[in-house]
Image: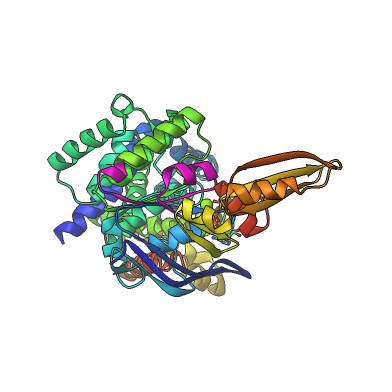
Amino acid sequence: MIEFIRDTYTVLWADLRVLRHRITRTLATSLMTPILYLLAFGYGLGRGITFNGYSYLDFVVPGIIALTAMTNSFAGAGSKLHVDRLFYRCFDEILMAPISTSAIVLGKALVGVIRGLISSLAMFVAGAIASPKLLFSPLLPMFIFALFLSCLTFAFLGELIGLTAKSHEDMNTFSNLILLPMTFLSGTFFSLDGVPEILRIALYFLPLTHSSMCLRAAALNQPFPWFSLAALGIYCLTFFVACTLSIRRHGS
Amino acid sequence: MEAIFTKQLSKQYGQIWAVKDLNLEVRHGEIFGFLGPNGAGKTTTIRMLTTLTKPTYGRAWVEGYDVIKEPDKVRATIGVMQQHLSLDRDLTVRENMILRARLHRFSRLEAEKRINELLEYTGLSEHADRPIDTLSGGLQRRAMIACSLIHRPKLLFLDEPTVGLDAHTRRRMWDLIRRLNADGVTIFLTTHYIEEAESLCHRVGIIHQGRLIAVGEPLELRRKVGMYTVVTVKNNGNSHFMYFPDRESATKYVEGLPSDVKTIIVRESSLEDIFVELTGRSVEDS
Ligand SMILES: Nc1ncnc2c1ncn2[C@@H]1O[C@H](COP(=O)(O)OP(=O)(O)OP(=O)(O)O)[C@@H](O)[C@H]1O
Ligand SMILES: [Mg+2]
């Protein structure tokens, strides 16, 4: 167990070193999109609208935090791994090391979690200025836990795509075809209550839907959707196992 | 027990057999050269022996451990320098070495000592804190060797250690490889430079289109084909190679040549002659 933690930290350490060199740029680029969303949807479109008894701004901020967590954890774990594996081949060096596969999988995901957490915490600060309600929710611990779980889930997903993508295009295709629609449709900007039954069921299969439901309920002090938290946990575990299998299969 | 032993080792990619039925023995303490043109299957062989690629069929043992059943034990005893730069380019030489040391579970103190020792050994001390990206090709290769030596491997795989290096840098690399070998490390290296195989390796294996076509000491291989080569060039520019076991028979052949032969060269056979003779083509035209 101690060895596992040590090995995981070693894998993470190298990526953290690299992240440290570029932290400002990373933060600036990763916050651009969500801040634009906040301005455009929160202040621009949604000013004056009330929604289920909340101002639209209060409603949309947790959704934007959820999508910040998703994009940054995904990219944080996925892009460097993908480049290291396909173009620089330095991932082979990690594979050669006498450490367990799960330490590699977790270590590589944690750098995504850290990037996701940094960006979404920065977004949280921006969001709290726009909608101070966020800070006073008694469910704040659940908010932080759900945020962490979301980051981990999307980091594993990013890692999985980084491990299996055969080219740079594969990476882009996945971002544009899966992540981008998920950004807009997963109850981030609107409530799923008003959506037609069939579409709603489909949207329940997207992990981001459950992230935004958990974060929103925690932020607005609504009844907590334990089912969504469990769904997120199942996604997290599934992606972890898929990463492990993908590394084991590497080379055959 | 040999350092490397393979039995029918084979790897298929789609329709191509990258390596086919390879039977090979590498002895402890030698520098073994794996010689072949581009696409011959050298890297694929190294990847299978170093547990990075699974063979389609066949078996291999490295330091007595089965590469398929005991990959962890194999990894712990070998060092590998890949054909392509495989270090983290954003990190410095030292950071890459720290990563490697930690992956091999060195304590902080042990790691520091070993890293300084290796920086000294490979002549990298003054470049230790430069990012890999900013190093010259020769220094990058040294850094790769330094990293692969961290855990004191008994057997070192070097995939084209000198490709793309200038003549001086290449010789310094050869010196380093010889020094390592003298210090007890068995070396398996691939190359498509024939003079490298000839001047550096105790034994060479020639691989062509996935198949091993000859193995032996350079001298032994030359003897097999013929110690002397006669090159004749006719007036129409066509050249022709003939091989002879000794100088006398070569001379006798030259005396009997017709008069339309423009140029005649009699020289000792080289590994290149053997290579061309065995593969039916030159290394360069691939
Ligand atoms: N991952 C792969 N997928 C498909 N084909 C491959 C793969 N790796 C190697 N090959 C093919 O297998 C053959 C042997 O390749 P290999 O890289 O082992 O040659 P090599 O002797 O190392 O050549 P070089 O001198 O260019 O490095 C080539 O025809 C190559 O195209
Ligand atoms: Mg090669």
Which is more toward the observer, A105 or B206?
B206
What percent of the width, then of the height, locates residue B25? 39, 64
Residue A182, image x, y percentages = 51, 58
Front residue of A170 and B133: B133
Q: In the picture shown, does residue B15 fall above or below A89?
A: below
Q: Residue at x 29, y 37 (%)?
A: B95
Vertical side of B22 occupied by B78: above or below: above
Q: Farthest top residue?
A: B126
Can residue B152 be seen in the rendering of this structure? yes
Taking the magenta stretch, the answer to whether it contains residue A217 is: no
Q: Is residue A217 visible?
A: no
Q: Which residues are magenta?
A: B180-203
Q: Is residue A83 left or right of residue A110?
A: right
Instruction: Please provide percent x and percent y for residue A227.
Output: 33, 71
Q: Where's the N terminus of chain A, which quadrant?
A: bottom left
* Front one among A217 and A102: A102
Q: Position of residue A63 (x, y in %)?
A: 42, 52
Q: Residue at x 48, y 37 (%)?
A: A32
Q: Residue at x 26, y 45 (%)?
A: B150
Residue B199 lies in magenta, yes or no? yes
Dividing the image into four quarters, tell me where ligand 1 lies: bottom right
Q: Left or right: where does residue A223 sit relative to residue A208? A: left
- Colouring rule applied to residues: rainbow
